[in-house]
Amino acid sequence: MTAQIDHALEEIRRFRPSPEFAAQSVADPGLYEAARTDRLGFWADQARSLLQWEKPFTRTLDWSNPPFAKWFDDGELNVAVNCLDRHVAAGLGDRVAIHWEGEPGDSRTITYAELTDEVKRAANVLTDLGVGEGDRVAIYLPMIPEAVVSMLAVARIGAIHSVVFGGFSAESLASRIDDAEASVVITADGGFRKGKIFPLKLTVDDALERSAGSVKQVLVVRRGENEVAWNDERDHWWHETVGRASNDHEPKAFGAEQPLFILYTSGTTGKPKGILHTSGGYLTQAAFTHKNVFDLHPERDVYWCTADVGWITGHSYVVYGPLANGATQVLFEGTPDTPHPGRWWEIVEKYGVTILYTAPTAIRSFMKLGRQIPHEFNLRTLRVLGSVGEPINPEAWIWYRHVIGGGSIPVVDTWWQTETGAIMISALPGITDLKPGSAQVPIPGISVDILTDEGEHIVGEGGGLLVITEPWPSMLRGIWGDPERFKETYWEKFGDKYFAGDGARRDEDGDFWLLGRVDDVMNVSGHRLSTAEIESSLVAHPWTAEAAVVGAHDETTGQAVVAFVILKASQEEHGNDAVLASEELRTHVARQIGPIARPRQVFIVNELPKTRSGKIMRRLLRDLAEGREIGDTTTLADTSIMQIISAQVR
Ligand code: 6R9
């Protein structure tokens, strides 16, 4: 048996960097050569040049006890100082760190000097609340500046943060608090979402009733101004504590392997995994990739990553990467469509955003609404676009480049995971010839490969399982409290190689194409087909707005392709004949990819089930396609969506 993944969908468009862009690029092609010649020396150089070390390291990597890596481990640094104080000391105190935009339209501008001040105050308060080195602090906040301040204050005193996305339930929050045994929670009275207040403090109160009782103190930011219940022994207002605290705080240097944060991510089975990241290596790779993948010119760029700080993208590319690099960035509390569907583009215009980093799911939902909405705004300041979170199909890539980017600016598709900590596979704008739909090449200093199920290297072109073959600076250091699960999940399958759980193929140029999670790979009559590839074909049809594909059990073929498709609004105006559309799309896929890929069924629906981070939950669609009872829907952004879809399918 081989793990080859058959494919036929060819994407042949190529975009070379413009000479003007290449001429001003911060990355130069020499990076690849340097990393190839001496990989560890390359990372040591990056760590030294991008960060400020209080005690220089002499050891780059200790891999004597795999899979437990140590990077730069005899060096000492303070992560918050690297993100704040050193920029102020370098005379950049007046540079804007954060242009914050609240959902209702209120805004705040915060300079590096002001942010440093606020973090020092918060660090003093956390110390007063009894938080010491290595203690865990849970952060459950909306996208407000205090979220960034809290993370950095925790880092500054050598404690460990566990940010829990503000959309998670009391139960999820309680299980994360318990797993990490957090002693303090930082939250807000409430936050804004789609014009309403969501009561965060209430959820924290509820979570603490359910939890085992490690939390002794709760720090509450006033944001929603909604009524809250108060426990005098335990609860403290941010403005009364941090607001009045001293801004005098002497930072301590910590070892490079000092734990920085835990971030929970769902596995295929069982309870969420607490992914553990540490300091020096993580910050090195976050800063390196943020600078080179986005071609950051901190003195003139206005960068905007739309991710919430509750996800890894928010950790590495809202907080640590940009601030370590002294960037000016936009932080936005709201959603793309409140109070109007042009809200994002209004923000790009207002702040003159030059670099935008977002997810394909957002891009496709804008595609659905049409180009006239973004075209009402001035988007000409944009010069680099990024994508993350799932494969971006070539149609969405082209739309992003043309409609948002004006047709000539680079789009970088960045592949990485909570576990990898920072970007691993991506083009470098200014260097790489871009291919829509491909994440392209490992960044300098990263080694990846594609293996068969049996662990054999696939020579040349071909599809299989993506592995990372050498340790990397921002790699996860473990699963909190569960070293066995860490080994089992990522290292058991291929020994010393990290198993990412994604399918990928390499094309004749050596570029990588991500094919979705391996549990999203279907086997139809002995052929492996990627859900992502068929989705990409469906979305390329002019009638389709969005598509999700699953493999459903089939008597004859093992698995059969079942598709769920949302048609474009323009299509609905033309009568929206579901039977006709479904027949047309089946034929289209058969034509584009081959008869083997022809979906057994194409269901026309109005919605797809998505998690709060925008990932389609194909597992639920598979339940539906196989006529089973629908599984656990608690992590859906809208838990009622599956009922609506089921009704449409029946
Ligand atoms: C950063 C982030 C990780 C999983 C990963 C893969 C998918 C992320 C992707 C991509 C194709 C890309 N993924 N980026 N697939 N192309 N550019 O999203 O982390 O939430 O842990 O998800 O997301 O399947 O394994 P995380």
Image (cartoon, rainbow, N blue to C red):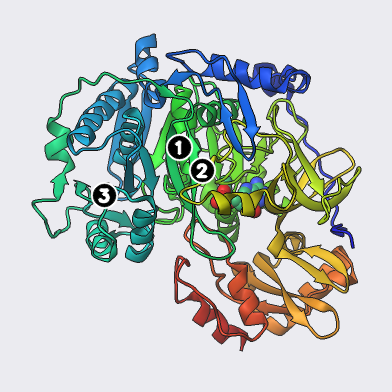
Q: Is residue 525 left or right of residue 185?
A: right
Element under disc 1:
helix
Judge whether 640 appears above or below 350 on screen: below
566 relative to 554, above or below: above
Mark 1 vs mark 3: give the one in front. Answer: 3
Percent across and percent down for residue 150 are: 31, 38
Judged from this view, the residue extending furthest toward the bottom is 650
Q: Amino acid at mark 1?
A: Val
Residue at x-position 64% and y-position 86%: 627
Reading the image, the residue beneath label 1 is: 318
Q: Amino acid at mark 3?
A: Thr
Asked which quadrant contains residue 624, the reply is bottom right
The amino acid type, in three-letter code, at marker 2 is Thr
Q: Residue 432 at what x, y percent from top left? A: 75, 30
Residues tagged 1 and 3 counted as in contact (Cβ below 8 A): no
Above or below: residue 41 compared with residue 527: above
Q: Are marks 1 and 2 in contact (CB under 8 Å)?
A: yes
Q: Residue at x 80, y 46 (%)?
A: 450
* Labelled pair 2, 3 in contact (Cβ < 8 Å): no
Residue drawn at (50%, 56%) of the image:
613
Q: In front: 85, or 307? A: 85
Q: How many labels were placed on the picture?
A: 3
Question: Which numbered disc covers residue 187?
Answer: 3
Instruction: Please provide percent x and percent y for residue 122.
Output: 23, 33
Instruction: Write down the residue under mark 2.
Output: 313
Q: Is mark 2 within 8 Å of ligand 1?
A: yes
Q: What is the CA distance from the residue labelled 1 to the residue labelled 2?
A: 7 Å
Mark identifier at residue 48: none
Mark with earlier residue (1, 3): 3
